[in-house]
Amino acid sequence: MAEREWFEKDFYKVLGVSETATDKEITRAYRKLAKELHPDTHPGSEEQFKEVTAAYDVIGDAEKRKEYDEVRRLGPAAGGFSGGQQFGDFGDLGDIFGGIFGRSGRTTRARRGDDIETALHLNFRDAVFGVTTSVSLPSHDNCSVCHGSGASPGTSMTACATCQGRGVLADDQGPFSLSRTCPTCHGRGGRLEKPCTTCGGSGRQASSRSVQVRLPAGVDDGQRIRVKGKGAPGRHGGPAGDLYVDVHVTSDSRFARRGRHVTTTVSIPVTDALLGSTVSVPTLDDPVTLKIAAGTQPGTTMRVKGRGVPAHGKSAAGDLLVTVTVEIPTPLNDAQRALIEQLASSLKSEEKV
């Protein structure tokens, strides 16, 4: 999430805590809201659940919380001063303030890398049992021809005449001196005699990188997983951003989820429902045999302990919930119809007694 958006979102208010809340209080508030708004148990609350999760991703992380508080403390006006001058990226604040009390040139500060968002599609079984998988992410490396300089081989960069190679210009504002990016070289400090034809003078080439992501057992459709430090690299020695993986679980023709429980249905003949029997039921592992009691009603749910989502952390293993449906034979031949009519007559006689 870009720092620019942090001005518009009060994550403390989203979680219902004060700005002085402790880490434990923030975690406690998040867990309570996540339980109340989880889409599995409260359909229609997906957007609220995502908002709560996004808030916790920021203020639930000590480093991000510190950065978030600092950005909010500076306020939207930090991007400009008197006269309404605006600066497009809060990452440039180091350049702005670096030139306020002096003209020592451009100040470079460490900047945290951007967060990256990506989508990952899982089959039902992998979502239940958890999986380690690779995610391919776009990346940028130094150009293989100019090695990051942006200049064609054999040429160089000449110092910008406007800013004298500093990349910034100083504007006097009374007792202050405000720095702004040089409009000629756009902060680069120089001009390329001949830009590299491979990278167009940027010094960078698009590429991709692979990141290993461990998804825990029981990950839900629509859940967002944060992988710390696997986002874009930081600048000037700053830490890397985080990777956010939005999980999409493919539906299964036989199974569904109810929290940590896995659900399925089994169909039995009406004679088995009346007289009792056994039935083989598929699971996500090996089939199990269930006993059907005589007189089992349609819609009856039977429980197979421990055959749902495996135990993970403090969460106990879920169960397999098997709902029974009863097959009604059709059409009936004359002999079958006669037997059913005889049964119906017998049952009516018992009701009158």
Image (cartoon, helix red, strand yellow):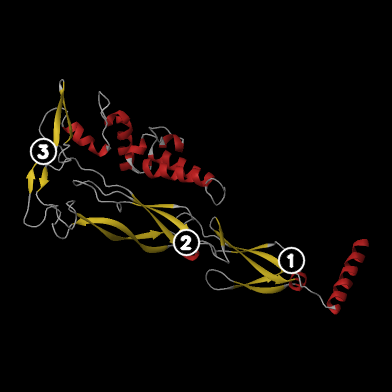
Residue type beneath disc 3: Arg
Q: Which mark is residue 296?
A: 1
Dot 2 or dot 1: first in sequence order is: 2
Q: Tell me, yes or no, whether the two marked residues, 2 and 1, touch with CB atoms within 8 Å.
A: no
From the viewer's perspective, is the residue at label 3 or at label 2 nearer? 3
Residue type beneath disc 1: Thr
Other-residue count near label 1 (Cα within 10 Å), few / some / many at <14 / 14–19 / ≥20 = many
Residue type beneath disc 2: Ala
Q: Quadrant of residue 153?
A: bottom left
Residue wearing tag 2: 127
Other-residue count near label 3 (Cα within 10 Å), few / some / many at <14 / 14–19 / ≥20 = many
Q: Is residue 278 left or right of residue 312?
A: right
Vertical relation: 100 (above or below) 107: above
User: Mark 3 falls on what kind of element?
Assistant: loop
Q: CA distance from mark 2 to mark 1?
A: 32 Å
Vertical relation: 231 (above or below) 282: above
Tell me the quadrant of the picture where the C terminus can be found: bottom right
Q: Quadrant of residue 336?
A: bottom right
Q: How far across and down, in percent of the image, does residue 5 sit?
A: 36, 38
Q: CA distance from mark 3 to mark 2?
A: 53 Å
User: Mark 1 falls on what kind of element?
Assistant: loop
Dot 3 or dot 1: first in sequence order is: 3
Q: How far across and down, in percent of the image, does residue 58 sit?
A: 37, 42
User: Mark 2 falls on what kind of element?
Assistant: helix
Q: Nearer the viewer, residue 168 or 18?
A: 168
Tell me the quadrant of the picture where the N terminus can be found: top left
Residue wearing tag 3: 166
Q: Tell me, yes or no, whether the two marked residues, 3 and 1, touch with CB atoms within 8 Å.
A: no
Q: How far across and down, in percent of the image, does residue 97 sit?
A: 19, 31
